[in-house]
Amino acid sequence: MPNRIDARFSALKAQDRAAFVAYVMAGDPDAATALEILRGLPAAGADIIELGFPFSDPMAEGVPIQRAAQRALKGGMRMKGVLELVRAFRQGDAETPVILMGYLNNLEAYGHAAFARDAAEAGADGLIVVDCPPEEADPLADALDAEGLALIRLATPTTDDARLEVVARRTSGFVYYVSVAGVTGTKEADADIVAPAVARVREATGLPVAVGFGIRTPERAAAIAKVADAAVIGSALVDEIAGALTDGTPAAARVLALAKRLADAVHGARVSETVG
């Protein structure tokens, strides 16, 4: 039986559409609102959800996601709570892939086998660990394999062909291509530069390539959707929560409204290109 990640990319490929991957932080700004956002994302157009688990030192993240992690931790969100959010989401959605994303420290504290077991039981489909090099990933990969969870690795503009071979080993689901050097939310992705890199990663791995970092607007998302298998947007969505807290407006409504605009741009990108 194909897993949810493979099934979703296969369906989108048949429609010649890229995936819109929405990143949100578990527990931001609180558990109840985070669950409301999670439950609303598929209807807003999210094809895949990346759910960040908060960590006190998120080294790859820019200010928006750093602050989201701080808000979540301050509200008491921990790994058990993250999995409870996934479990609650699965009560109403059995099809949308959910990828957990975060840092190795949390998984070391939890235990690889215990985490893989609990994540699979909750209904997660895969894992992105930002700071786990492939050379040190075998114990984690073994635990995930035992539970049928995908280990999704990152490639960057500095990943050469030799390194890409290493990255490809034991990677499944898709490859996350970091489009710009630096942290999230600080630079803009350039589709013309990204396109040949995506083609190279796709050829080397045989997997779909999702492009993240540097995508904040519907226009930028549409441009990336023309050259990649998926566009990942996180900081822009997280910023809506910060804005809602400042303005006193409903956070979930703001996040989902932006998600809808981004999803429409991603899903319509290749259609408009064909028509044009």
Image: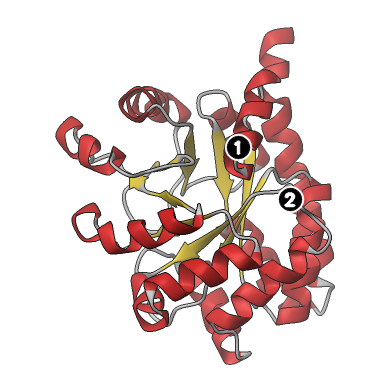
Quadrant for the C terminus, please. Answer: top right
Q: Residue drawn 67% across and 28% down?
A: 12
Q: Which residue is mark 2?
A: 259
Q: Is residue 30 left or right of residue 71?
A: right
Q: CA gap, disc 2 to disc 1? A: 27 Å
Q: Residue drawn 57% across and 62% down?
A: 120
Task: Using the image, determine if residue 151 lies above or below residue 45.
Answer: below
Q: Amino acid at mark 2?
A: Ala
Q: How is the image coloured?
A: secondary structure
Quadrant for the N terminus, please. Answer: top right
Residue 264 falls in image quadrant: top right
Disc number placed over residue 13 in the picture, else none: none
Task: Point out residue 46 in the picture as x, y percentages from the top left corner.
Answer: 71, 46
Residue 276: tell me if it is visible.
no
Task: Using the image, determine if residue 17 lies above or below residue 68.
Answer: above
Mark 2 or 1, which is nearer the eye? 1
Mark 2, other Cα within 10 Å: few <14 / some 14–19 / many ≥20: many
- Of residues 245 and 96, the one nearer the viewer is 96
Q: Amino acid at mark 1?
A: Pro
Task: Point out residue 47 in the picture as x, y percentages from the top left corner.
Answer: 69, 43
Q: Please tell me whether mark 1 sits on a helix, a strand or a loop.
A: loop
Outermost residue, left direction? 162
Task: Point out residue 186 in the picture as x, y percentages from the top left corner.
Answer: 44, 56
Q: Please tell me whether mark 2 sits on a helix, a strand or a loop.
A: helix
Q: Residue drawn 34% across and 63% down?
A: 140
- Of residues 247 and 67, the one nearer the viewer is 67
Task: Point out residue 109 in the picture as x, y percentages from the top left corner.
Answer: 37, 83
Task: Using the image, determine if residue 243 lies above or below residue 266.
Answer: below
Q: Which residue is mark 1?
A: 2
